[in-house]
Image (cartoon, rainbow, N blue to C red):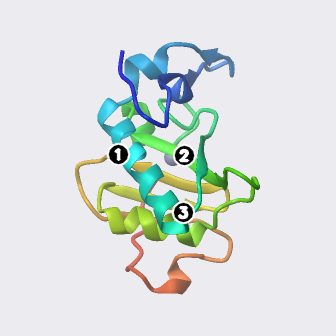
Amino acid sequence: MWKAKHFGPYEFDGVSREGLSMPGTGEKNFSPEMARKLDVYHEALSAYLGYDICIHVHKNGGWAIKGHSDTSQHYKGLAADIHATNKKTGARVSLVDMYIVAEKLNLFGGIGVYDWGLHLDDREARGARWDKTRIRVVKSLAITEMVQDVA
Ligand SMILES: [Zn+2]
């Protein structure tokens, strides 16, 4: 039974081909090491913003058997699709802030930015970056050279 400070294994449970939740699969298939990295990310993002936050793992956004690109890290239990909110007000944390902190930590091999939030993964190769937002949120910042990749 793995544990993380800010996440429960159930948050990474997969969804069946019929769309039903598959209890216990996050516990079995999601990487404890990735969960620990998400803990670090949670605390770093909160510190950066100066307020408490909630990080929401999306449905089918942890370990998965379908619904992602063919080579997705989700199928290996190494990826999480998330967004963050202010714990007190419920307001969404901006994609830019989420991205900056993910990049600064240097913990995630893959970082993808979407209108709904971030895809973070623990692939071995470093530096997979992509911005699929409508307005190219991250590219506009010129923080890093964006590399087109698959989520
Ligand atoms: Zn993803």
- Expressed as whole percent of the image width and height from the top left, the position of residue 25 reads 47, 17
Which mark sits nearer the N-terminus, 1 or 3?
1
- Expressed as whole percent of the image width and height from the top left, the position of residue 98 reads 53, 64
Badge 1, how many Cα within 10 Å: few under 14, some, many 20+? some
Which mark sits nearer the N-terminus, 3 or 2?
2
The reply, left or right, for residue 33 in relation to residue 63 is left
- Expressed as whole percent of the image width and height from the top left, the position of residue 70 reads 45, 40
Image quarter hosting the N terminus: top left
Which mark sits nearer the N-terminus, 2 or 1?
1
Q: What is the three-letter code of the residue carrying label 1?
A: Lys
Which residue is identified by label 2?
Answer: 81
- Expressed as whole percent of the image width and height from the top left, the position of residue 30 reads 40, 28
Badge 3, how many Cα within 10 Å: few under 14, some, many 20+? many
**CB atoms of marks 1 and 3 within 8 Å:** no
Which residue is identified by label 3?
Answer: 113
What separation in Å lies between label 1 and label 3 (alpha carbons)?
18 Å
Using the image, determine if residue 81 lies above or below residue 118: above
Which residue is identified by label 1?
Answer: 37
Mark 2 residue's CB less than 8 Å from ligand 1? yes
Badge 2, how many Cα within 10 Å: few under 14, some, many 20+? many
Residue 69 in view of the camera? no
Name the residue: 68% across, 17% down. Answer: 20
Helix, strand or loop under label 2:
strand
* 94, 48: nearer the viewer: 48
Q: Quadrant of residue 117?
A: bottom right
Using the image, determine if residue 142 lies above or below residue 125: below
Which mark, residue 118?
none
Q: What is the three-letter code of the residue carrying label 3?
A: Val
- Mark 1 or 3: in front is 1
Residue 53 in view of the camera? yes
